[in-house]
Amino acid sequence: MKNVTSKVALLLFALAVVVPLVWILLDSFKESVEVFSSVWGLPKQLKWANYQTAWTEAGLGRAFFNSLKVCLGTLVILVPIGSMAAYVFAKYRFKGSGVLFGGFLGGMMFPNFLVIVPLYFLMHSLHLYDNLYGLVLVYVAYSLSFTVFVMTGFFQALPNDLMEAAQIDGCGHARTFWSIMFPLVRPGIVVVGIFNAIGLWNEFGLALVLLPGAENRTLPLGIYDLAQVQHYQSDWGALFAGLVIVMTPVLIVYWIFRDKIHETMLAGAIKG
């Protein structure tokens, strides 16, 4: 009876995830009239022009590459810095390390909207307002807490003997980290990379405040602009096509690395 209940619950959960995705995909190929007249039906004819409208006329193509630049730029800076900080917290003891680590953890509980106003003035004073590089720096700062928290657990799981053996063989602190310890936490790097990338790809609030210009809009802002326009033009097919464009990269990344994520989460659960 317990197995049947679990299977039913898993089936309902799967339907709750899959049905909306299929519905959005089908409606992305329909005329606007057909979206309302046949909500759950198959499209009479595949209207690929919806994707062209969303990509070019609505500017989602430019927004796509802006989001890609911001995500990759953030991860390139975030992962090495976060890993180095986590390594120090995990393997070195110094005065005030507990307070500093607690400060990093506290950053995960700090809502974004509380710092919107001072952040707005700070970016203005640094001439980084409405600038993708400025948004990258803000994202690095906001993502650092989660990255340090996760990576610290992975470094703590590595035996200290490895670090001591490397240093006996003549490795300094930096080489011990980059040549020995950092490659061994590759599963953690994959996990923080994927979860941070998904969060950055969908981030809306900070980008809305810090990127007012049309040239630097990211994908969530592009979808927001498209939704505002389509309310008046009633081109719902293009709006659904835009949603598919936003979702597809995230689904592909998760599908490619799904086994690695499951293995890492399972290992963490067993260890805990």
Image: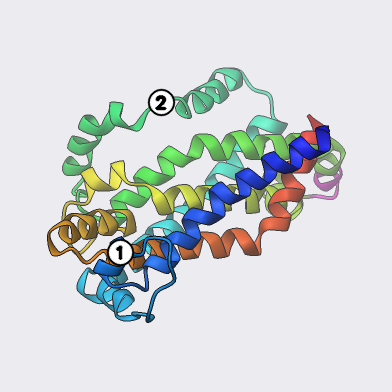
Left or right of 165 in this view: 96: left
The residue sitting at 72% across, 49% down in the picture is: 262
Which of the pair 6/124 is nearer the observer? Answer: 6
Disc 2: which residue: 110
Classify 10 Å Cα crowding around label 1: few (below 14), some (14-19), many (20 and above): few
User: What is the three-letter code of the residue carrying label 1?
Assistant: Ser
Disc 1: which residue: 37
* Residue 190 visible (yes or no): yes
Left or right of 29 in this view: 228: left
The residue sitting at 66% across, 60% down in the picture is: 257
What colouring style does the render use? rainbow
Q: What range of the chain is rendered magenta?
A: 165-170
Q: Tell me where residue 45 sits by quadrant.
A: bottom left
Is-magenta flag for residue 168? yes
Give the structural element (helix, strand or loop) at label 2: loop
* Image coords of residue 111 (percent x, y): 37, 28
